[in-house]
Structure formats: C-alpha cells, structure tokens
Amino acid sequence: MKRLTRYLGVGAAATVIDISLFALFASALRYNYLLVGCATFLVATAANYALSVRYVFESGVRFERHHEILLVFAVSTIGLALNQLVLYSGVEYGHLHPIVSKLMATGIVFGWNYLARSHFVFRIP
C-alpha cells in the first residue's frame, strides 16, 4: 500500500507536467492535439521514470539498468498507444474537449503503467 501511495504522488507530478504542457500547446497554442499528446506523454513518462526509481521502485535489482530501461520503454510504448487511442476516440467519437479526453487517457495509462512496471519491470518484495 505504501508503494502505491508513493506511485500516486509520482503519477500526480507526471500528470501535472503532462496536462499542463498539453493545455498550453494543444488548447492555448492550438497545435494538433495528437502530436501534442504524444510529445507530452513522452516528457511525462521520462519524469515518471526518474521519480519512480527514486521514490517508488528499486532500480537495477531485477534486471540490469539498460535492460530495465528497455522494459520501461516497452511498457510506455503500450501506454502511449492507449493514450493516443483514448485521446482520439474521446475527441473524434465522443466529441469531448481534448483536455477531458487527455485526463481520461491519463487515468487509464496510469493504471497500466503501475501494473506493468510492478509486475514485469521492477521486483516487488
């Protein structure tokens, strides 16, 4: 439970980065929401990884660091696909505001990232 609580804090920080940059570039500056969604997801994922290995998971225990990073990128690639699918579906089919769709996508991907990282990437004692 403690790990999940710390991951929620890390996720909140990454979400602030993701949504703030998304709002600036997609809403305020009117860049293409899918391109912005991809870019901000990558920035937030890098922040999430850096914070996660510092505060949530123990890095380099289960796999060597380079292998661990490759696994995080694999998990994040699936997360990015989910992010883009939910973002696109919400805007194009649900007729939702891009920020609402982005929030939905972020919630879904948060769950995926935690489960995948805790079961496939990092060792959970």
Image (cartoon, helix red, strand yellow):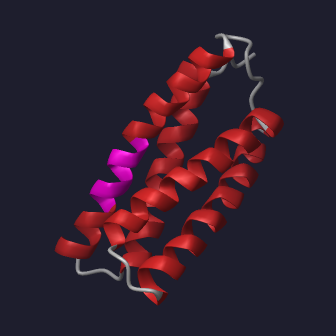
Residue at image coords 71%, 44% = 7
Q: Quadrant of the C terminus?
A: top right
- Residue 96 part of the magenta segment: no
Is any atom of residue 119 visible in this view? no
Q: Quadrant of the N terminus?
A: top right
Along the horizontal axis of the image, is 46 left or right of 83? right
Question: At which x and y percent is residue 63?
Answer: 64, 10
User: On screen, 86 above or below 69?
Assistant: below
| Boundaries of the magenta span | 79-86
- How many callouts does the rendering have? 0
The residue furthest left is 93
Chief secondary structure of the magenta portion: helix
Question: At which x and y percent is residue 68?
Answer: 60, 20
Residue at image coords 58%, 38% = 114
- Residue 80 part of the magenta segment: yes
Is any atom of residue 22 visible in this view? yes
Front one among 9 and 38: 38
User: On screen, 67 above or below 79?
Assistant: above
Along the horizontal axis of the image, is 47 left or right of 69? right
Question: At which x and y percent is residue 53?
Answer: 75, 33
In the figure, residue 98 lies in which quadrant? bottom left
Front one among 64 and 85: 64
Residue at image coords 53%, 81% = 24
Residue at image coords 42%, 43% = 79
In the figure, residue 97 lies in which quadrant? bottom left
